[in-house]
Image (tube, coloured by chain):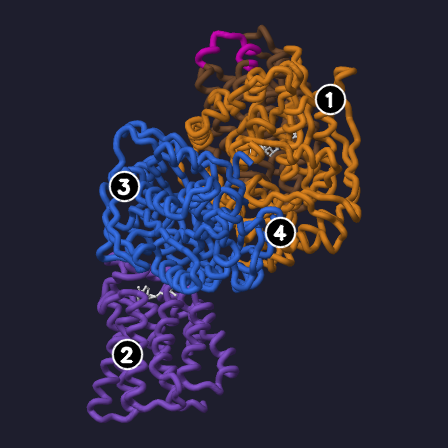
Chain colours: A purple, B brown, C blue, D orange
Amino acid sequence: MLEQNKDYLTDLDAAIGDADHGLNMDRGFKKVMKQLPQVSDQDIGGILKAVSMTLISSVGGASGPLYGSWFLRASSVVSGKQELDEEDMLHLMEAGLDGVIGRGKAQLGDKTMVDVLNPAVDAFGRAVVSGKDMLEAMEQAVNAAEQAMKDTKSMQAKKGRASYLGDRSLGHQDPGATSCYFMLKSLFKTLSCPDD
Amino acid sequence: MLEQNKDYLTDLDAAIGDADHGLNMDRGFKKVMKQLPQVSDQDIGGILKAVSMTLISSVGGASGPLYGSWFLRASSVVSGKQELDEEDMLHLMEAGLDGVIGRGKAQLGDKTMVDVLNPAVDAFGRAVVSGKDMLEAMEQAVNAAEQAMKDTKSMQAKKGRASYLGDRSLGHQDPGATSCYFMLKSLFKTLSCPDD
Amino acid sequence: MKKLINDPLDIVRESLEGMAAAHPDLIKVNLDPAFIYRADAPVTGKVAIISGGGSGHEPLHTGYVGKGMLDAACPGEIFTSPTPDQMLGATHKVDGGAGILYIVKNYSGDVMNFEMAMELARSEDIRILSILIDDDVAVKNSLYTQGRRGVGTTLLAEKICGAAAEQGYSLKDISHLCRRVNINGRSMGMALTSCTTPAKGTPTFEIGEQEIEMGIGIHGEPGQKRMTLKSVDEITEMMALSIIEDLSYRRTVREWDEDKSEWQEVELINPPFQKGDRLLALVNSMGGTPLAELYIVYRKLAEICQKQGLQIVRNLIGPYVTSLDMQGCSITLLKLDDEMIRLWDAPVNTLSLRWGL
Amino acid sequence: MKKLINDPLDIVRESLEGMAAAHPDLIKVNLDPAFIYRADAPVTGKVAIISGGGSGHEPLHTGYVGKGMLDAACPGEIFTSPTPDQMLGATHKVDGGAGILYIVKNYSGDVMNFEMAMELARSEDIRILSILIDDDVAVKNSLYTQGRRGVGTTLLAEKICGAAAEQGYSLKDISHLCRRVNINGRSMGMALTSCTTPAKGTPTFEIGEQEIEMGIGIHGEPGQKRMTLKSVDEITEMMALSIIEDLSYRRTVREWDEDKSEWQEVELINPPFQKGDRLLALVNSMGGTPLAELYIVYRKLAEICQKQGLQIVRNLIGPYVTSLDMQGCSITLLKLDDEMIRLWDAPVNTLSLRWGL
Ligand SMILES: Nc1ncnc2c1ncn2[C@@H]1O[C@H](COP(=O)(O)OP(=O)(O)O)[C@@H](O)[C@H]1O
Ligand SMILES: Nc1ncnc2c1ncn2[C@@H]1O[C@H](COP(=O)(O)OP(=O)(O)O)[C@@H](O)[C@H]1O
Ligand SMILES: [Mg+2]
Ligand SMILES: [Mg+2]
Ligand SMILES: [Mg+2]
Ligand SMILES: [Mg+2]
């Protein structure tokens, strides 16, 4: 999914950044895909940790450490697990978000990945609390992420490269928020049907 | 006249040279125009010599020394004169041509100024021999120059920058030949009606 | 897009291979993870200085590795911060036992990747300090932004700190010196054209035949404002005055406290320039601007400084911190003191900055 | 056209003024007639070396004035040979009594203007020799052309002869050395884009998004042939092989015979490169091409030379002989001998080439 959207992400980054986000994500996740077969016998925590390490050492830019931190923290709360229930998934997402915030110090509304990750966690949590099953909860999280991604258009960036643009960042969708939406979408797909 | 044709000459030079001929000629002849009032009390030889020195120290490129040599040699055969008859004019033009050839070593057909200067001298000479007066002879020389200038289109350059292009110089009119035509035209105008 | 490249994805590696082939006497290259280091590293007992950042700004940083300047440089992909494993690899290679200084340009990516590298290195008990360079006055405030970008002052800090390290300064002293260079250096850049990143293949931004972009960074990102083309004298004046009239920029940065072993928030304030100050002036090409034009910029800059009572006592004019093929320039003014002048003048022998050796 | 200029007609002068303001310790500038000369000129008892040519190729020649290289440089208007009064003025200023060598690139304009200057100087009994540089293998023959253009080898000759002059070589020996450098040096250039001369304001030639021009000179003139864009490895191979496989170029040039006091037609033949030869490789940017790309060119060039049994023992990589903002590059290979290597390595201190000082 990231490969297909590589140019789209890069174009978004060209508008308010430095035109590399698609390439960064593609480079990182291609490496991840290559590496996955070698770690497929590990538990989910182990897999996520391996993904984290690969992203950290191959993505670079702002997104590398942030995605790396997401996966690293996410991995820490599901170590040893072979399967995840709704609770686990919520913890995973919460931990990932904490990782990103811990590393990048962005706040809600700063026009970053956090603006997608945060509402996605919230939506997932609400769904779980109201008794939705995994697939339904995921769907709601992804829908929330999609909306949140679009909402970054009307934000003025306060973190990352786009912040230098001042109000010229208004009207443009944040590339990192967008890749987060893609990532959540495909991650949910993978985690819910691991054999695809 | 050169000023009006500055861009035209430069465009010709862009096609087969380095896009400076119009500027070079304009720079030189503007200086000449500025200087003329100061030397107007001199004889024609003196004026031509002064023009030569100005061109040599302000045109540069290939055309600077060549035009400079034309005027320098031309001046040497009319020194002391206040007026020129047809004979004088013929000598002047012959000497000028010699100056250019002596400096630049170009032969007829090399696609240079020589290809205009030479036929112009010939035409002038023929006209004088056949008893034409100054104005008629000049007209014929200018006409010959115009034709010769156009004829440089079908030549392959063997001297100057355009020679590097090999047969890619075919089809383009030589900038130096073109400026020579303009120069002859205005020179004749000036020399024949010095009070204009 | 036309560039002298093979596959856009191979540019950084192939370029490093070319550097390794060309200058084995001066530098060595590690390809995976990618970093360049001094041929004689580690220099025992000397503080090692490491910098790095996205590629596309050459000669920054790879061209500044060598005696009297950087011990190692970590090039990321084009306009992409390098990854922590690069910095960690370089750290291992150049560690001479007297500590390491990371000079980091203030971009969220660089900051985070260098921080991760530091965390990893510290877990191995390697002594590391870091200084952020944030000198771009085009970024007005730090409250609503990432803070000022690191641009031209970076290479001045690398040179001055590199000389200090060569002369046996301690890690602590070098880090203070580096911070002093940073708060005394200010830059402003502008672009006539965008640059084209090889992977994208088209210019990062569109710009008209009669437009310029003022307050540009070094990543081809759009600048502070778009305006109509002006004469170089007007452009130089606008840039010089934004620098000179930039008063007391104030921000908090995270610096490592060695005694407490933790990150501290430190408030830094740039002292304003004052009449009589001695300056180093860097007139820098963004890549595609000819040297002759830079001298025309310098001509006006010298005139302006003189009028303002500022003395340019050192200068550097050329393509030192570039953005690929972008046309445009930047000006950096660094207020010097005697110590900085002495260190600036000290011998240096790198691929792109060399004197006295 | 967007450039960092005021009036296109003032570029050369304003740029010289900028150089004068920036480097009073190294050079002095005479504005009318225009030339740059060593701050310590004349150096008594030393042969003086003067070069010059159209502007737009910076740092050639103005960036190469200083200890160990040129005594003076005469910049013409952009892409226009300088005028004899400039060379004469420079000659008077740097004449140290041991004779003068003019290093002249083989363009009809340069040749004629320098010849006129020599005639004027000789009429004042100043001893002057001149050597033509004609190293551009893109020009195949000399019968139907002006002969080969002078390009990259020029700066190598300036460096090597400048060092010889500094070491007290006689005028005759330096002129022989210069000729030896010239016949052992060969260059080939290519362009990805045209350049834009400021006075014309539009690119000198049109070139498509998928086209390159091979065998280009340094004046934005169209090259030898147009072809479709290729990878840098292919382009480098084409350029390197046209140089290496260029066998024995033969031409007659006019050189001044001091004994007979007249111009002599001298036949010169370039010796071909042979296995085992030691080379200096110059990988040169036409101006707008980033340094990183030049290193990719060098990477391939080194590989090709190795395969051919040629050893690159010295190299120089960067923008040294440019064509304004043109993107593209040229390769120069110079066959070295021990003496040339020693002189190449000798200290030099100019604005754009500096080591050992
Ligand atoms: N401090 C931060 N916290 C959270 N996200 C950030 C931060 N800085 C940048 N980002 C995200 O990173 C994205 C840019 O990633 P990328 O283009 O790969 O890196 P870079 O900006 O270094 O080129 C932005 O769109 C934004 O969503
Ligand atoms: N050796 C020569 N003899 C006669 N004319 C020449 C010679 N070399 C060049 N020219 C003329 O000079 C013209 C170019 O002049 P110009 O553009 O001013 O100089 P440059 O070629 O140095 O840029 C050519 O069009 C040609 O007519
Ligand atoms: Mg980016
Ligand atoms: Mg011309
Ligand atoms: Mg980036
Ligand atoms: Mg010219």
**Residue lying farthest to the front in this orientation:** C259
Q: Mark 3 — residue?
A: C242
Q: Which one is nearer the viewer's eye here, A108 or C325?
A: A108
Q: Disc 4 and disc 2: Cα gap in Å?
A: 50 Å
Q: Is mark 1 within 8 Å of ligand 2?
A: no
Tag 1 and tag 2, C-beta contact below 8 Å: no
Q: Mark 2 — residue?
A: A94
Residue B155 x/y as whole percent? 67, 40
Tag 3 and tag 2, C-beta contact below 8 Å: no
Q: Disc 1 and disc 2: Cα gap in Å?
A: 82 Å
Task: Look at the image and give the residue range highlighted in magenta.
Answer: B37-49
Residue at point 60%, 12% (across, down) = B85
Q: Disc 4 and disc 1: Cα gap in Å?
A: 35 Å
Q: Is mark 4 within 8 Å of ligand 5?
A: no
Q: Mark 4 — residue?
A: D298
Q: Amino acid at mark 2?
A: Glu
* Above or below, C99 relative to A176: above
Q: Mark 1 — residue?
A: D172
